[in-house]
Amino acid sequence: MPLLIQCWSDDRSRKREFQVEDTLLDSKMSLMSLIQKLGMPVGSSCGGESQCGWCRVRVLKGAEVLNAPTELERAYYARQTGGENEELVQGFRLSCQAYIQKESFEQEGAELWVSTTYW
């Protein structure tokens, strides 16, 4: 079953919607790579090494279709906030460290909504 991905502007005035089949993903494709493959820009100066934070997105819906935050991602947020992971709690993720779980394609009606400041 396809996964519905919606990419929203920060103020939610604009969105792009995509139906993604599991065949589009490979097991090592990050959310950042997938969004870029769908034609949306994703900021990054570190090449997906979880250093710059430009690829940060806010998950508005569907966090359960993503992997748990990685150690690299937790370390990034700890550096930014002095040890607190408040941004993770608020739904922010580094798209270079977030991966869509293949099992999510087995769930009927699965959706992932994300936003960032530059869409």
Image (cartoon, helix red, strand yellow):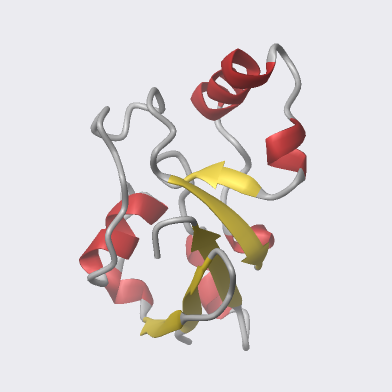
Up/down of 48 relative to 40, above or below? above
Q: On the picture, is 67 further left or further right than 64?
A: left
Residue at image point 58% right, 75% down: 12
Residues 1 and 87: in front is 87
Residue at image point 37% right, 74% down: 22
Tell me residue 51's x, y (percent): 39, 22
Q: On the picture, is 72 further left or further right than 90?
A: left
Residue at image point 48% right, 87% down: 1
Give residue 63's quadrant in the image: bottom right
Up/down of 27 relative to 5, above or below? above
Tell me residue 102's x, y (percent): 48, 63
State how many labels appear: 0
Tell me residue 37's x, y (percent): 22, 65
Q: Image quadrant for the C terminus?
A: bottom left
Residue at image point 26% right, 72% down: 38
Tell me residue 118's x, y (percent): 40, 58
